[in-house]
Image: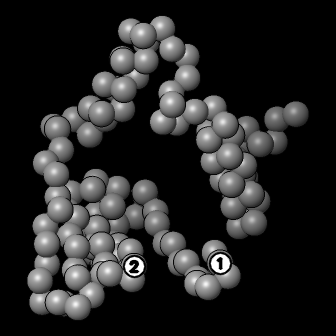
């Protein structure tokens, strides 16, 4: 992705393993994410004090889907059909981006061939 004053490079796969952590660099420092699909460890390294690695990891619940299920149950109990966090408009935008990405790299699923 290209922006007016910067480039963004994103590499991710849920079906392959990498031993290289993900890094998000900003003006004040970098966030280091080990195993992004699991979000096991999160660190901040200050740009000025590179020797200091601040652990920002929050201990997750045993079930990785705990927070999603909790949010779903809250919506259900409140009689809501749409989440203010992941609303329908956002879902449609995400699907359009994913469809375009699949088209550009030639990924075709069997269901895509059904008219």
Asked whether 78 or 23 is in front, the reply is 78
Distance from disc 1 to disc 2, alpha carbons, whole Å, reads 15 Å
What residue is shown with label 2? 26
* Figure check: 7 above or below 86: below
Q: Is residue 104 left or right of residue 56?
A: right
Residue sitting at 88 percent across and 33 percent down?
Answer: 115
Label 2: state its secondary structure: loop
Location of residue 34 by image quarter? bottom left
Residue sitting at 27 percent across and 56 percent down?
Answer: 39
* Figure check: 15 above or below 54: above
- The answer to whether any part of residue 95 appears in the image is no
Q: Is residue 114 left or right of residue 30?
A: right
- The answer to whether any part of residue 72 appears in the image is yes
Q: Earlier in the sequence, mark 1 or mark 2?
A: 1
Any mark on residue 35, and which? none
Q: Residue furthest right?
A: 115
Asked whether 109 or 43 is in front, the reply is 43
What residue is shown with label 1? 3
Percent across and percent down for residue 79 are: 48, 8
Percent across and percent down for residue 58 are: 16, 51
Residue sitting at 73 percent across and 38 percent down?
Answer: 111
- Crowd around label 1: few <14 · some 14–19 · many ≥20 (10 Å): few
* Figure check: 37 above or below 8: above
Percent across and percent down for residue 99 are: 72, 52
Residue sitting at 36 percent across and 32 percent down?
Answer: 68
- Crowd around label 2: few <14 · some 14–19 · many ≥20 (10 Å): few
From the image, which quarter does the N terminus lie in? Answer: bottom right
Percent across and percent down for residue 86 are: 52, 36
* Figure check: 6 above or below 76: below
């Amino acid at each position: 992705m290209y922006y007016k004053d910067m480039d963004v490079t994103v590499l991710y796969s849920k079906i392959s393993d990498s031993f290289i952590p993900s890094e998000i660099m900003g003006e004040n420092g970098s966030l280091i994410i080990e195993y992004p699909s699991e979000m096991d460890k999160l660190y901040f390294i200050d740009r000025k004090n590179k020797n200091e690695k601040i652990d920002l990891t929050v201990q997750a619940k045993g079930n990785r889907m705990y927070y999603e299920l909790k949010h779903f149950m809250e919506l259900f109990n409140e009689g809501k059909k749409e989440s203010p966090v992941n609303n329908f408009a956002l879902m449609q935008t995400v699907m359009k981006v994913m469809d375009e990405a699949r088209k550009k790299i030639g990924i075709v699923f069997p269901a895509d061939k059904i008219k």
